[in-house]
């Protein structure tokens, strides 16, 4: 069975700093997708970034980038120049190519301090 | 695009009452998902549809829960009768049928409180 592990329950950094959130997963599949979703206090689930397992290039979206290490089954999220609006729960999620059931990590609560 | 629309945003009801949650997916998306989020169990997939047809409802907790998708732009999740343990945030999400089929876009959620 596929599992997703986020080992950092909570993190706190100063505004403008860079922060990295960790995510590891376990699967025997070769084709899959990985996602980071953000859930601010409003509870909305917002897609931050996605990565296809067959792509070696790490995905980037503005201040957000990932470090995808397929052999190590690691998918970390880096937030550069952090902003107060980045304060949220961040969930790592895994999806097999063969179905549509997202497997979720437990989440990391990120607090950006002014 | 307006994104996934859910209503109501908040619902407070008494145990035993019927609750209906509504969802309008993003136009052109072929897949629709219903999730439930609680502190204890995290995010759980309840059911998903492809082209208005239920594909997997194995996550529906019990017969009190039912979901329908009468057309491509509307879905409902009904709980009857509701119980306090149904209190949660219910999310609807949709996904394109081609290209980025695997990416799910979430609505704002419905906060349900059953007293």
Image (spheres, coloured by chain):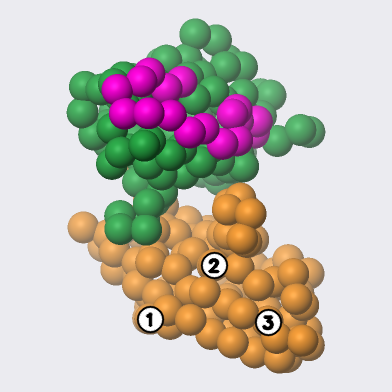
Does B33 sit above or below residue A57? above
Colour in which chain A is drawn: orange
Of mark 2 and mark 1, the one earlier in the sequence is 1
Q: Nearer the viewer, residue A23 or B99?
A: A23
Query: What separation in Å lies between label 1 and label 3 (alpha carbons)?
Result: 19 Å
Q: Which residues are magenta?
A: B4-20
Q: Residue B3 placed where, x, y %? A: 70, 35
Q: Quadrant of residue B62?
A: top left
The structure residue drawn at horizontal position 37% and vertical position 28%, both measured from the top left corner, is B14
> Which residue, given by chain and number where applicable, does mark 2 sit on?
A89
Q: Residue A93 placed where, x, y %? A: 44, 59
The label nearer to you, 1 versus 3, is 3
Query: What separation in Å lies between label 3 and label 2 (alpha carbons)?
Result: 11 Å
Query: What separation in Å lies between label 2 and label 1 (alpha carbons)?
Result: 13 Å
> Which residue, given by chain and number where applicable, does mark 3 sit on?
A112
Of mark 3 and mark 2, the one earlier in the sequence is 2
> Which residue, given by chain and number where applicable, does mark 1 sit on?
A7
Would you say residue B15 sits in the magenta stretch?
Answer: yes
């Amino acid at each position: 069975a596929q599992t997703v592990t986020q080992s950092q329950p909570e993190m706190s950094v100063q505004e403008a700093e860079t922060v990295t959130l960790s995510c590891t997963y376990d699967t025997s599949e070769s084709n899959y997708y990985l996602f980071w979703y953000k859930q601010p206090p409003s509870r909305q689930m917002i897609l931050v970034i996605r990565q296809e397992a067959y792509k070696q290039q790490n995905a980037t979206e503005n201040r957000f980038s990932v470090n995808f290490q397929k052999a190590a089954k690691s998918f970390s999220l880096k937030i550069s120049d952090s902003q107060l609006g980045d304060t949220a729960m961040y969930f790592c999620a895994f999806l097999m190519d063969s179905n549509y059931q997202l497997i979720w990590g437990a989440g990391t609560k990120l607090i950006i301090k002014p | 695009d307006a994104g996934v629309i859910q209503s109501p945003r908040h619902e407070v009801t008494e145990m035993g009452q019927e609750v209906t949650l509504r969802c309008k997916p993003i136009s052109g998306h072929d897949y629709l998902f219903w999730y439930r989020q609680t502190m204890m169990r995290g995010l759980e997939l309840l059911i998903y549809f492809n082209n208005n047809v239920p594909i997997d409802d194995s996550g529906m907790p019990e017969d009190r829960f039912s979901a329908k998708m009468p057309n491509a732009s509307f879905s409902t999740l009904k709980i009857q009768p509701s119980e306090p343990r149904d209190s949660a945030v219910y999310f609807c999400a949709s996904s394109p049928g081609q290209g980025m089929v695997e990416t799910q876009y979430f609505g704002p959620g419905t906060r349900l409180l059953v007293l």
